[in-house]
Image: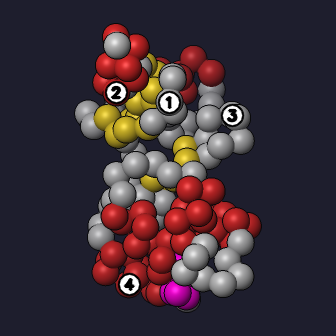
């Protein structure tokens, strides 16, 4: 789901000079309707029948445009299968090590970790990412059968 909803997102993007094309609107609507964390390919496969000439590269470009404007978060896992989250506010995620499902995990962020990292390394921390990995309930049930 989009952090502030569709209307706010459209208004914000327009205020930043971003045109809302039908393809961009469709990607935003897709992200607003899902609580999953889809890949660009998942979004592309869902939308390609509605837009003749839509390419996977176009979907990637749209998602990166939205990321650059802070309305989408990209979750990179090092295996070239980025997932995208319509909730761009800083929060944690938990990933199933079997099926790859990603869910939001909401709790207060821990700024002390950033402060400690800055003191220990001299870096100026921009943000931090904590990833929890486990087995989702569906995979755990399948394993017990």
Residue 11 - label: 4
In depth, the one of 47 and 111 nearer the eye is 47
Q: Which residues are magenta?
A: 20-24
Sort mark 2 into few (<14), some (14-19) or many (20+) by Cα contacts within 10 Å. few
Distance Cα–Cα, label 4 vs label 3: 33 Å
Question: Label 2, on which residue?
Answer: 138
Image quarter of residue 144: top left
x then y, percent, for residue 65: 61, 70
Tell which circle, 4 or 3, labels the residue nearer the N-terminal end: 4
Could you tell me if the residues under marks 4 and 1 are in contact, i.e. CB atoms within 8 Å? Answer: no
Camera-near label (4 vs 1) is: 1
Which is more foreground, mark 2 or mark 4? 2
Marks 2 & 1, CB-CB < 8 Å contact: yes
Give x and y (percent) for residue 86: 42, 58
Q: CA distance from mark 4 to mark 1?
A: 36 Å
In what element is the residue under mark 2?
helix
Instruction: Please indicate whether residue 66 sits to the left or right of residue 79 in the image.
Output: left
In the rendered image, which residue does mark 3 sit on?
78
Q: What type of secondary structure mainly makes up the magenta span?
A: helix
Q: Earlier in the sequence, mark 4 or mark 1?
A: 4
- Residue under the point 46% across and 48% down: 37
Whether residue 141 is visible to the viewer of this picture, yes or no, is yes
């Amino acid at each position: 789901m989009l952090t502030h909803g569709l209307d706010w997102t459209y208004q914000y993007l327009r205020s930043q000079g971003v045109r809302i094309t039908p393809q961009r609107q469709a990607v935003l609507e897709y992200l607003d309707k899902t609580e999953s964390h889809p890949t660009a390919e998942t979004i592309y496969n869902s939308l390609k029948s509605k837009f003749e000439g839509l390419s996977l590269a176009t979907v990637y470009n749209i998602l990166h445009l939205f990321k650059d404007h802070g309305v989408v978060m990209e979750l990179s896992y090092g295996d070239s299968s980025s997932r995208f989250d319509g909730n761009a506010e800083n929060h944690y995620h938990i990933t199933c090590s079997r099926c790859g499902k990603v869910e939001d995990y909401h709790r207060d962020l821990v700024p002390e970790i950033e402060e400690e990292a800055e003191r220990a390394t001299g870096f100026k921390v921009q943000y931090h990412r904590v990833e929890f990995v486990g087995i989702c309930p569906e995979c755990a049930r399948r394993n017990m059968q």
